[in-house]
Amino acid sequence: MAFQITLAVLSAILMVYIIILKVKLSNRNLFIETTLKKLSGIGNNGSTAEMMEFIEDLHKSVQYSSFLNDKLLNRETTDFIYEDTGNMHVFMHYTREESDAKRILSAGFRFAESFHRTAVPVTRDNLDLKMKHNDRKLFGDYLIIICISNDIVHKYTSELEKAGLRNYSLENILTELPPVKNENADMIYQLPAKFVKGYVNYKTGEIVKNPEFNPFYNSPSFSKNIAVAR
């Protein structure tokens, strides 16, 4: 009787585990279907030892180890990302190499034409964060956190409206270096490093903070950019 109860509990836990994987990995249906078939066979004819061995094998899966070890929703990580979200516009951007993440911390965030092409807004919602993360994490292990204070956003959004510059993006104005064209003839802009809060390695949970971070940074160049654009 005790064996049957133990096996039933393990089966229930594993079924919940598989359902979670199925929801979050819907584009990997073949893996899920194979896993469910294997689970069904163990549940009908297997032992507790076989069930435990299967769970261990699932954790050790090379294909999904990065997903299972994702540290994005660790308390330390979300505290860093969500801090003062009520007073700031927060964005995240993924990059593959740590050297690129360090360069962004020291030199600023470069973007082509539209800031929002690669930087997505962050809300204080774990489900929303996870959905955006699952959609973009293949672009790299390093998550750059960019924060601009509401005061700066409101000030220069208002100035753009007063100047009648409705076709200009706020982030294109918040630059100190003149934009340059790349090999594809796209205009490249560079957001100051002051707006870069730091970066997170979402696989290890490591957090690197930018000591020069200042979301209230207000450069004289911002108003000059509006004057030039008129």
Image (cartoon, helix red, strand yellow):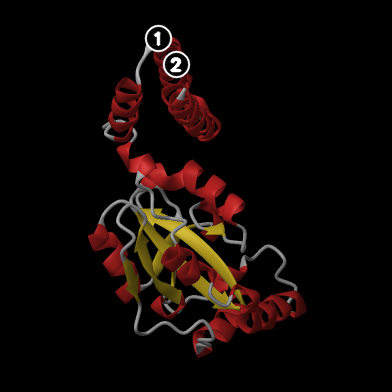
Give me the disc on residue 43: 2
User: Which of the 4 image quadrants contains residue 110?
Assistant: bottom left
Q: Which mark is residue 163?
A: none
Q: How far is mark 1 from mark 2, CA to CA? A: 6 Å
Residue sitting farthest toward the left: 99
Side of 201 where 113 appears, left or right: right
* Above-or-below relation of 174 to 45: below
Packing grade of label 1 (10 A; few <14, some 14-19, many >=20) is: few
Q: Is residue 167 above or below residue 210?
A: above
Query: Which secondary structure lies at badge 1?
Result: helix
Q: Count every numbered label the image shows and give the total.
A: 2
Q: Nearer the viewer, residue 28 or 199?
A: 28
> Of the residues shown, which amino acid type is indicated by label 1?
Asn
Q: Is residue 191 above or below residue 138?
A: below
Secondary-structure class at tag 2? helix
Tell me residue 14's x, y (percent): 46, 29
At a point 29% along the width and 32% down the height, the residue shown is 56
Q: Give the residue type at disc 2.
A: Gly
Which residue is at a point 61% across and 70% down the rendered structure image?
Answer: 170
Position of residue 154 measured from the top left corner of the image (x, y, whole percent): 69, 79
Image quadrant where residue 207 sits:
bottom left
Can you say which quadrant of the picture contains the C terminus? bottom right
